Image (cartoon, rainbow, N blue to C red):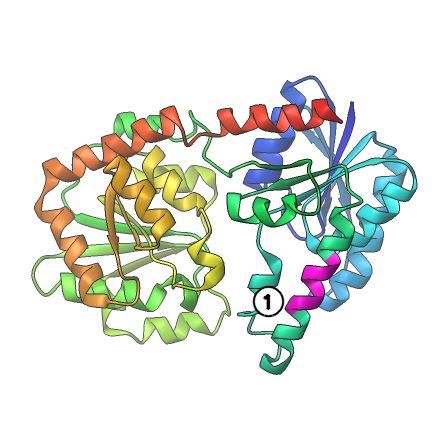
């Protein structure tokens, strides 16, 4: 089939969209296009990347301008199947359906739940806006040919509107971090890492404060990789006493992430107990596991089931700095047990939590179309 993936938000090298989904569909024999903002037309790994040039500033302007450009390119490509990845493209999906095209909505996040904690949405408006978006998603999803949900929780909501709803987890590629697992060696310094977006709700303050407590008993380093949001948060975090034990490396590409994980004694994923986080499945947790790195994770029931069943890390209260610090010290003081945790995590990825398994579900969804 002639397949076209659409985004007005994500980058040309987005891991879920381009590296996993587009490339898997290409390998399955489809002709694959990827329409993406502010990128030159090119071909990578057989996937035809089509750029739309937009000068939109801010989310509202992007929703007005960039989405129109995406629709124009989508129509020009004239694909058999359109697969879009942003809720702001729902109107585009409906227009493509009216033209007789097959359309898949890829739901990465529970948007109505997200809105309830979005700082840019005024608090008095959050509940009503969340309800409005939920209703609009319900209306639109009934008209689409398929729904690809990133978690079982999201899938359950959409199954009531569209029976052709499946869960396609954003698990890591089986071989991408395998060399890290095989090549990891004992390091002379104690290192905890966090990779991803750096937000208050993702536990940055607690991680930095915990590192200060760890250093009261032993020298250790917290390697932080990602981008602060909002940018002003960086200065606030730098003012914390524990930041002097932090090695901030900024945004890293995939090669940089691979290299960083060879240094890690543990990987941190300590999201706050927000409703949308409690039912999420963060890719970073599975990437730590894939690289053979023990995880210290929030003690949400869903995450505890994964971590404890596979004996690949420790779950803690993400708001309790002392509990986080104690878990970090335990891993550093028990290297043999920590090594076994890392090995268990890698085995779990090899058997269950890998993209190769999920890509088969994606191909089956397309075959049903």
Q: Residues within 10 Å of mark 1 (few under 14, many from 20)?
A: many
Could you tell me residue 39's position as x and y percent? 71, 45
Magenta region, residue range: 130-136
Horizontal side, residue 323 vs residue 151: left or right? left
Q: Residue furthest top?
A: 29
What residue sits 57% from the left and 23% below the top?
Answer: 360
Q: Is residue 178 magenta?
A: no
Q: Does residue 78 appear in this view?
A: yes
245 up-or-down from 225: above or below: below
Quadrant in which the C terminus is drawn: top right
Magenta-colored segment: predominant secondary structure: helix
Could you tell me residue 356's position as x and y percent? 50, 24
Q: Residue furthest right?
A: 99
Q: Does residue 293 appear in this view?
A: no
Q: Nearer the viewer, residue 42 or 103?
A: 103
Quadrant in which the N terminus is drawn: top right
Q: Is residue 131 magenta?
A: yes
Could you tell me residue 161's position as x and y percent? 70, 47
Horizontal side, residue 294 vs residue 279: left or right? left
What residue sits 41% from the left and 32% below the top?
Answer: 353
For residue 172, what is the image quadrant? Answer: top left
Circle count: 1
What residue sits 35% from the left and 38% below the top?
Answer: 259
For residue 79, what is the image quadrant? Answer: top right
Could you tell me residue 178's position as x and y percent? 36, 26
Horizontal side, residue 8 vs residue 123: left or right? right
205 up-or-down from 150: above or below: below
Q: State the residue position of label 1.
A: 115
Q: Nearer the viewer, residue 62 or 346?
A: 346
Q: Nearer the viewer, residue 287 or 365?
A: 365
């Amino acid at each position: 089939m002639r397949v076209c993936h659409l985004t007005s938000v994500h980058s040309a090298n987005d891991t879920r969209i381009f590296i996993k989904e587009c490339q898997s569909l290409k390998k399955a024999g489809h002709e694959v296009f990827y329409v993406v903002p502010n990128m030159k037309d090119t071909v990578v790994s057989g996937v035809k990347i089509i750029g739309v040039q937009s000068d939109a500033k801010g989310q509202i302007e992007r929703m007005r301008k960039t989405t129109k450009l995406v629709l124009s390119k989508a129509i020009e490509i004239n694909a058999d199947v359109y697969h879009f990845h942003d809720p702001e493209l729902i109107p585009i999906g409906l227009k493509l359906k009216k033209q007789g095209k097959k359309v898949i909505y890829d739901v990465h996040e529970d948007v109505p739940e997200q809105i309830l904690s979005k700082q840019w949405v005024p608090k008095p408006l959050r509940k009503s806006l969340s309800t409005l978006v939920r209703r609009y998603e319900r209306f639109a999803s009934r008209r689409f040919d398929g729904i690809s949900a990133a978690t079982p929780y999201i899938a359950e909501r959409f199954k009531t509107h569209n029976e052709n709803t499946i869960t396609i987890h954003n698990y890591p590629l089986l071989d991408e971090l395998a060399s890290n697992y095989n090549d990891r060696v004992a390091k002379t310094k104690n290192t905890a890492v966090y990779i991803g977006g750096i937000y208050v709700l993702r536990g940055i303050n607690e991680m930095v404060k915990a590192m200060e407590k760890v250093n009261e008993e032993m020298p250790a380093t917290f390697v932080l990789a990602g981008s602060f949001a909002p940018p002003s948060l960086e200065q606030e975090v730098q003012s914390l006493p524990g930041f002097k034990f932090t090695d901030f490396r900024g945004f890293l590409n995939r090669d940089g992430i691979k290299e960083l994980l060879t240094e890690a004694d543990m990987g941190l994923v300590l999201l706050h107990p927000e409703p949308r986080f409690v039912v999420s499945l963060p890719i970073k947790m599975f990437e730590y596991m894939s690289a053979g790195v023990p995880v210290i994770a929030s003690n949400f029931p869903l995450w505890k089931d994964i971590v404890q069943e596979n004996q690949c890390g420790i779950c803690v209260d993400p708001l309790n700095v002392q509990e986080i610090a104690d878990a970090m010290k335990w891993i550093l003081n028990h290297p043999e047990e920590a090594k076994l945790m890392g090995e268990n995590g890698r085995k779990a990825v090899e058997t269950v939590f890998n993209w190769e398994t999920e890509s088969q579900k994606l191909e089956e969804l397309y075959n049903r179309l």
